[in-house]
Amino acid sequence: MSWKENKALGGVLAIVALAAIGLLVWQMMPAEQANMITLQCTKCNATQQVAAVGGMEFPAKCPKCNEVAVYPTLKLHCPKCNKDFNIVDAGDGQVSKAVCPECKTPLQQPGAEEENKPE
Ligand SMILES: [Zn+2]
Ligand SMILES: [Zn+2]
């Protein structure tokens, strides 16, 4: 069996598995967009809602400006002013420095690790 066949078979199995998992999750979830994630382009700031699936790679290509600069966003909630907002998780450590766009309160990311990379 060639690697191409393996890959094709693997792809089909992955899709079937994802569909099964997705269906399972979807049935367990209340009717809300629990499996949708927001992606944002860091070049043109265009956002798009996509279904969260495994195997997504970032940065992805932006459908608007064609730049490969699309990253997932994280949903954040400001405990001070109760604002919900998204920030782009570009994997550059900016997420851990997120501040509320309303009241500028620095927001601690649960699970976010402070990385002090040398510039
Ligand atoms: Zn763009
Ligand atoms: Zn706030």
Image (cartoon, helix red, strand yellow):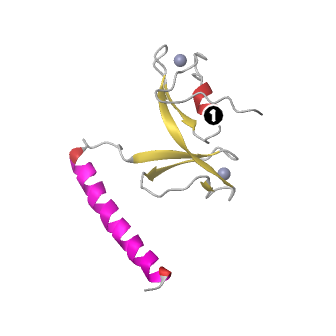
Above or below: residue 4 compared with residue 90: below
The quarter of the rendered structure image containing the N terminus is bottom left
Asked if residue 2 is among those painted magenta in the image, a careful observer would answer no
Above or below: residue 2 compared with residue 49: below
The percent coordinates of residue 33 (x first, y second) are: 36, 44
Asked if residue 12 is among those painted magenta in the image, a careful observer would answer yes
Q: Quadrant of residue 40?
A: top right
* Residue at left offset 54%, top offset 21%: 107
Taking depth in this image into account, of 63 and 111 the one nearest to the observer is: 111
In the picture of the structure, the residue carrying the numbered disc 1 is 93
Taking depth in this image into account, of 94 and 73 the one nearest to the observer is: 94
View extreme (bottom): residue: 1
Dot 1 crowding, Cα within 10 Å, few <14, some 14–19, many 20+: some
Disc 1 on helix, strand or loop?
loop
Name the amino acid, label 1.
Gly
Q: Quadrant of residue 42?
A: top right
* Residue at left offset 44%, top offset 82%: 5
In the image, which residues are magenta? 4-27
View extreme (front): residue: 1
Q: Is residue 67 left or right of residue 48?
A: right
